[in-house]
Amino acid sequence: MATEWGNNTIGAGQLQGWAFSLPTEPGLLPVISVRPLTPSFNGDGSFHWSISPTSLSFPTEAQLGVSTLWSQMSNDQRTITYYLLVMNFSRATVSYAFVESNL
């Protein structure tokens, strides 16, 4: 079962970077995503997201997006820090919570 936690706000078209450190456990794979707590008032499918300087652009209907999880083990091998980006693809400020589970 997943655990939901936090109450965060992200502005329209914004990115937020997050880092989470967990003890090193063989076979542990955290799965972290976000769940919107407020509507985005977006839904016409015509919004395009663009990332520079290499200029990646794609149409999106989604309100929130989460990047791939990057990870880095500490020098003493006791913890792994996981990094991710939360992206608001809508034209409105959105509140969200994290949803986490372990595989």
Image (tube, helix red, strand yellow):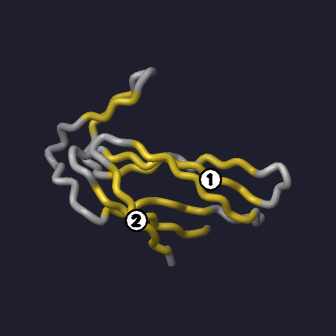
**Quarter of the image where one finds residue 26:** bottom right
Q: Residue at x 60, y 58 (%)?
A: 20
- Give the amino acid type for the residue marked by disc 1 in the picture: Tyr
Q: Position of residue 93 (x, y in %)?
A: 26, 51
> Above or below — where is 60 with respect to 57?
below
Looking at the image, residue 80 sits to the left or right of residue 66; the answer is right
> Above or below — where is 58 with respect to 1?
above
Q: Few, some or many C-alpha atoms within 10 Å of disc 2 (few <14, some 14-19, many ≥20)?
A: some
**Quarter of the image where one finds residue 28:** bottom right
Kindly identify which numbered label has been placed on residue 82.
1
Kindly identify which numbered label has been placed on residue 22.
none
Q: Position of residue 69 (x, y in %)?
A: 57, 50
Distance CA(mark 1)–CA(mark 2): 17 Å
Looking at the image, residue 45 sits to the left or right of residue 18; the answer is left
Specify the quadrant that holds the C terminus. bottom right
Secondary structure of residue under mark 1: strand
Q: Mark 1 or mark 2: which comes first in sequence?
A: 1
**Quarter of the image where one finds residue 35:** bottom left
Looking at the image, residue 61 sits to the left or right of residue 19; the answer is left
Secondary structure of residue under mark 2: strand
Residue projecting furthest to the right: 76
Q: Residue at x 41, y 60 (%)?
A: 34
Q: Nearer the viewer, residue 97 or 70?
A: 97
Q: Position of residue 8 (x, y in %)?
A: 39, 60
Q: Nearer the viewer, residue 21 or 62?
A: 21
Q: Few, some or many C-alpha atoms within 10 Å of disc 1 (few <14, some 14-19, many ≥20)?
A: some
Looking at the image, residue 1 sits to the left or right of residue 38; the answer is right
Q: Which residue is mark 2?
A: 97
Q: Residue at x 67, y 54 (%)?
A: 81
- Give the amino acid type for the residue marked by disc 2 in the picture: Ala
Q: Residue at x 44, y 50 (%)?
A: 66
